[in-house]
């Protein structure tokens, strides 16, 4: 795997201060055994943009972060200057190393609300300190990967490239956003460093400034635009994409592009890839008219690329209106997930392991807001698939609980939203365990995956596992999150105890 951006930096201090203040309090409380292991689940509550699912991304960066956590001398000095922490605690941080366990969905897994996509089990201080960076990576990259998938599906087989770096919230958002967009299905990125770090295909055309730089003797923009196109074609005969909307798409840009293509053809230059890009105006109308001009001139294989504030809805509209587009360059609405800029994953305590007995004690957060009641305890998550391989539901079980889909009469489960019904049975189904070991005792137990493998995993699920009805943009089918009877009863027992 190529060098990644975060390995050049120590990101250990990427945390909210309350994690340090809690850790300091744990450390200095003589009644607390700081070797006591606790477990936290990472999950989210609502799919972005009202969609039917989300795409899990950012796991590789989380893994790198956890394996390389350490506090430098300058970190300790800064924390000392804050004045909130004891010297004994600072001495503990000086020798800090993450020694916990992490289980997670494979990166690129389709995921649904309220199921644990990552579980961290570690001594209490360690588990507390890693919260912010884990959530930052999951929330950002999963959001962008999910948005990219929506845009790619709207493009209906046409390539989508990330053009968003200059509109991203900063350079990290641009680079990791490009990674996430590629996982979500984008064909490549214009962000060069993302290509370097993550082995993503890069590509680009030209800017309006290149066209505007050229000047003719009589200051005729049609002539100067033609000279700009000729200049660019000389340097890039095999990737000659000309930006045609600097002045007038149909009266100047496309006719000048056709002249250059004809000159190349006359010179015996058979370009491997050539065409035009349109970055403004009525894209549906302009692409139809441009296609007519190109075809009439004999350049039926010339590509038409469009950009300019695109998303899944504008792309759908352009294509519905008959727009003639080969590929889309998508910028700010992808890299910022403009329509839904917050993902909302959370990090919640689910269990404490008694240091003396080894008993795992489930923990539950209870709220007047029912949606904020957590799923307690250590758990397994299964994806239940029917005979065709389509996922009919996900299933939460107590960790290590036997889930046998081959049982005679089917497997009985509980729908937590309709628990009074007793007819819920999976028949002829298989159960795929989703969480897999990532880190054990602070050491990696799985190899880093190539980004192409992660990207292919997403597409394979969309093709074979996720129902088309769940992939709708409007009113998608809801994916069910069910529970084994044993798990449901355990959760209800905890809720009843709190109600006494």
Image (spheres, rainbow, N blue to C red):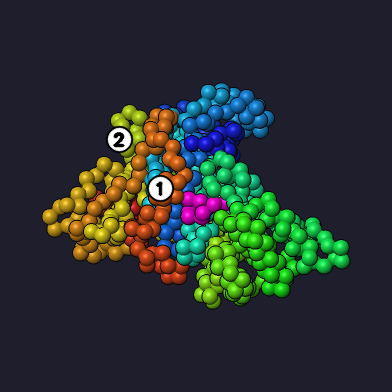
Q: Quadrant of residue 359?
A: top left
Q: Does the magenta stretch include residue 186?
A: yes
* Left or right relative to 288: residue 423: left
In the image, 16 versus 261, the foreground residue is: 261
Q: Name the residue under label 1.
A: 117
Q: Which residue in the protein does label 2 denote?
A: 359
Q: Which x, y percent locates residue 230?
A: 72, 58
Q: So how many labels did they put on this image?
A: 2
Q: In this view, does 257 lie above or below 381?
A: below
Residue depth check, mark 2 versus mark 1: number of the one nearer the observer: 1
**Does residue 134 belong to the magenta stretch?**
no
Examine the rendering and report whether any part of residue 15 can be seen: no
Give the mark nearer the N terminus: 2 vs 1. 1
Asked whether, in this view, residue 206 is left or right of residue 132, the answer is: right
Q: Residue 449 carries which label?
A: none
Image quarter of residue 309: bottom right
Whether 187 is drawn above or below 277: the answer is: above
Q: In this view, does 6 lie to the left or right of 98?
A: right
Query: Which residue is nearer to you in this view: 430 or 216?
Result: 216
The image quarter containing residue 462 is bottom left
Relative to 383, say whether 22 is above or below. above
Q: Residue at x 56, y 55 (%)?
A: 272
Question: Residue drawn 55% across and 68% down?
Answer: 300
Element type where label 2 sits in the image: loop
Element at badge 1? loop
Q: How far apart are marks 2 and 1 (CA)?
A: 23 Å
* Residues rendered magenta in the picture: 181-189
Image vertical order of residue 300 relative to residue 115, above or below: below
Closer to the camera in the image, 435 or 30: 435
- Picture coordinates of residue 320, whole percent (x, y): 51, 75
């Amino acid at each position: 795997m190529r060098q990644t951006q975060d390995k050049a930096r120590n990101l250990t201090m990427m945390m909210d201060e309350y994690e340090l203040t809690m850790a300091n309090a744990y450390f200095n409380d003589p009644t607390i055994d700081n070797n006591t292991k606790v477990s936290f689940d990472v999950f989210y509550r609502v799919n972005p943009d009202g969609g039917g699912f989300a795409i899990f991304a950012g796991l590789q960066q989380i893994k790198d972060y956890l394996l390389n956590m350490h506090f430098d001398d300058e970190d300790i000095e800064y924390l000392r200057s804050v004045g909130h922490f004891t010297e004994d605690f600072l001495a503990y941080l000086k020798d800090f190393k993450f020694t916990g366990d992490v289980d997670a969905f494979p990166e690129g897994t389709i995921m649904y609300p309220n199921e644990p996509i990552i579980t961290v089990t570690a001594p209490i201080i360690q588990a507390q300190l890693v919260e912010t960076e884990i959530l930052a990576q999951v929330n950002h990259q999963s959001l962008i990967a999910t948005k990219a998938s929506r845009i790619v599906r709207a493009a209906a087989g046409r390539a989508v490239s990330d053009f968003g770096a200059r509109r991203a919230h900063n350079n990290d958002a641009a680079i990791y956003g490009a990674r996430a967009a590629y996982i979500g299905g984008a064909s490549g990125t214009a962000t060069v460093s993302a290509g370097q770090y993550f082995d993503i295909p890069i590509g680009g055309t030209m800017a309006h400034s290149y066209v505007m730089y050229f000047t003719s003797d009589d200051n005729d923009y049609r002539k100067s635009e033609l000279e700009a196109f000729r200049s660019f074609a000389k340097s890039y005969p095999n990737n000659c994409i000309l930006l045609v909307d600097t002045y007038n798409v149909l009266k100047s840009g496309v006719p000048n592009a056709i002249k250059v293509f004809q000159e190349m053809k006359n010179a015996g230059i058979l370009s491997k890839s050539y065409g035009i890009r349109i970055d403004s105006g009525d894209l549906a109308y302009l692409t139809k008219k441009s296609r007519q001009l190109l075809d009439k001139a004999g350049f039926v294989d010339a590509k038409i690329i469009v950009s300019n504030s695109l998303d899944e809805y504008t792309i759908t509209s352009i294509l519905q209106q008959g727009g003639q587009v080969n590929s889309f360059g998508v910028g700010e609405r992808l890299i910022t997930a403009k329509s839904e800029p917050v993902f909302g994953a959370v990090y919640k305590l689910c269990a404490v392991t008694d240091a003396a007995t080894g008993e795992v004690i489930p923990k539950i957060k209870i709220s007047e807001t029912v949606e904020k009641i957590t799923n307690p305890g250590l758990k397994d998550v299964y994806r239940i698939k029917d005979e065709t391989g389509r996922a009919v539901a996900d299933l939460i079980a107590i960790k290590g609980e036997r889930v046998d889909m081959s049982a005679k009469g089917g497997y009985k489960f509980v729908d937590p939203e309709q628990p009074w019904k007793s007819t819920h049975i999976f028949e002829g189904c298989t159960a795929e365990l989703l969480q897999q070991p990532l880190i054990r005792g602070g050491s990696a137990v799985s190899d880093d995956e190539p980004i192409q493998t992660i990207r292919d995993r997403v597409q394979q699920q969309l093709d074979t596992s996720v129902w088309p009805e769940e992939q709708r943009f409007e009113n998608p089918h809801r994916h069910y999150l069910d529970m084994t009877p044993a798990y449901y009863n355990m959760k209800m027992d905890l809720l009843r105890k709190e109600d006494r």
